[in-house]
Amino acid sequence: MKFRWPWQKRTEEDELASLDAMLDSAFQPVSPSNDFLTGLRETLIAGEQKVLGLSRRTFQQLLLVLGAIASGVLLIFTGIRTILNIIGAFGRLRKPRGEQDPPSETVSES
């Protein structure tokens, strides 16, 4: 249940009717000029637009293919780099038995 103050006696139907009347007076239909309609028709129905000598659809497909190739190359390089890092980590962990790490330099307090 919606609470209404005593001074709010307008019903929702009255509010909608006044809003409808206000919108009817504010928005009157306008007929477009013939020049506008002709220009709009030419824009919408005109032949294929060319980008770099290619149709728009062919250009979009070309960009999509180039993007896919670039993504694949980056993915391959990332995989190779990961494999090399893993191999390098195993090489650092597995040292020959006779080899030891050089002693670290420590600062002695005197």
Image (cartoon, rainbow, N blue to C red):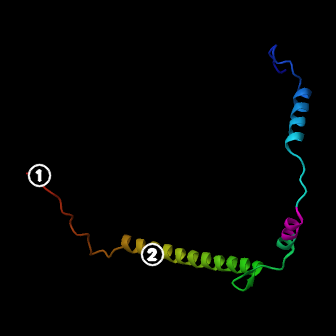
Q: Is residue 33 left or right of residue 66?
A: right
Q: Amino acid at mark 2?
A: Ile
Residue at the (86%, 36%) spot, across then down: 22
Asked if the magenta segment contains residue 59, the reply would be: no
- 53 vs 94: above or below: below
x, y percentage for residue 96?
32, 76
Viewer-closest of 81 and 44: 44
Q: Which residues are magenta?
A: 33-40
The mark that comes first in sequence, 1 or 2, is: 2
Helix, strand or loop at mark 2: helix
Residue to which mark 1 is pinned = 109
- 54 vs 1: above or below: below
| Helix, strand or loop for the magenta stretch, by majority | helix
Viewer-closest of 52 and 36: 36
Query: Which residue sits furthest left?
Result: 110
x, y percentage for residue 60?
72, 76
**Real-space CA distance between mark 1 and mark 2, rounded to the nearest whole angstrom:** 40 Å
x, y percentage for residue 7?
81, 15
Q: Quadrant of residue 73?
A: bottom right
